[in-house]
Image (spheres, grey):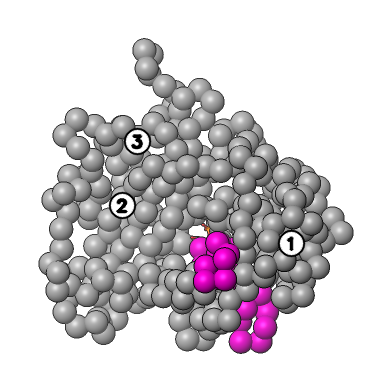
Amino acid sequence: MTHAPGGDHLWRSGRIVPSAEATVHVRSVGHASVSAVFEGVNAYRDDSGGLNVFRLEEHLTRLADSVRLSHLTMSYTVDELCAATVELLRRNEVRDDVHIRPWAFVEGNPIEQMVPAGAGCEVVIDCWPFRSRLAEPVSRIAAVTSWRRVASESMPPRIKAFANYHNGRLGNIDAQSRGADWPIFLDDRGRVTESSGATIGLVRDGVFHTPGLDCGILEGVTRDTVLRLLRDELDVPVREHDLTRADLHLADEVMFIGTSAEVLPITVLDGTRAADGVIGPVTTALREEYAAVLRGRRPRYKHWLTPVWVAEPAGR
Ligand SMILES: Cc1ncc(COP(=O)(O)O)c(C=O)c1O
């Protein structure tokens, strides 16, 4: 990432500030995750050297939903936060693929973790370089973790609360202790839910399957993108329904899906070869189509792209 002269900046509650000056008191629990919520969004460079944020409005709408379900009060609209994101990327002179983290936490340095309903929040937007893997033949090793996904009746994974990632982290540690990259969580009834930072999808006999939103997973923006591309561009039937661990093992193709994961094939599952250990044809086609949309090569999906720079300035 290239930074503007004067160093890198972030957006904090209405102002762009040098990141070194964006501090909070060490005692503040508002900042320390108890009720903080966040988003993960990517911007991608297009073929003419422009930069576009992918599905920014959907991500910031989900942030607003997370704020609401956490019983916080945010004084910025989705439109204002979209404009703030673009302003930040321009100020930081970001020209290449970048990951953006908008987040909201209780303002005013509270020391009591049971912050009252309706507490106001600060919003910060930060960004750092992102490396897309869509053009590389990479795959991941997955393991079903013995930790269960936190129940939506207890702490809904449907919203993106930092606190939920304690469950995710335990799954990661468990999966990694067994030589895997990322976990797959079942719920308390043995249904497949999601990974610690991605949705799960599989293909069997030419049909794409993914857990329904009613099993308590995050309402993934990439999940929605992928379902539309499969149905409308790749002519692959899609089904959203309960899946079991056996379905994962019987699949022809299994994959992680998410903003950071993009579409990432799983070739080893629970220590055995998944999907014959190769990247399958639906996964390959989906990765290509997803990349084409992100890079601005599909006019039909231009409404998903928020331009930061329209084209590379002359002489760069
Ligand atoms: C737990 C979890 N599930 C699913 C996803 C995928 O969501 P999205 O596609 O909106 O990035 C993420 C992404 O951050 C996640 O953290």
Observer-side mark, 1 or 3, equals 1
- How busy is the neighbourhood of tag 3: few (under 14 within 10 Å), some, or many (20 plus)? some
Secondary structure, magenta segment, majority class = loop
Give me the C-alpha separation between circle 1 and circle 3: 37 Å
Q: Position of residue 176 (x, y in %)?
A: 52, 68
Q: Are marks 3 and 2 in contact (CB under 8 Å)?
A: no
Q: Is residue 285 left or right of residue 295?
A: right
Residue 86, by quadrant, is top left
How packed mark 1 is, by other alpha carbons closer than 10 Å (few <14, some 14-19, many 20 or more), is: some
Residue pictured at 31% horizontal, 46% vertical: 84
Q: Please, what is the three-letter code of the amino acid marked with disc 3? A: Met
Of helix, strand and loop, which one carries label 1? strand
Q: Is residue 158 magenta?
A: no
Image point 56% across, 34% down: which residue? 295
Foreground: disc 1 or disc 2: 1
Residue interval drawn in magenta: 175-199
Image spot of residue 250 (x, y percent)? 81, 68
* Quarter placement of the C terminus: top left
Disc 1 target residue: 273
Looking at the picture, which amino acid does disc 1 mark?
A: Arg
Q: Which residue is mark 2?
A: 125
- Residue 234 in view, yes or no: yes
Residue on which disc 3 sits: 1
Q: Earlier in the sequence, mark 3 or mark 2?
A: 3
Q: In the picture shown, does residue 283 fall above or below 180?
A: above
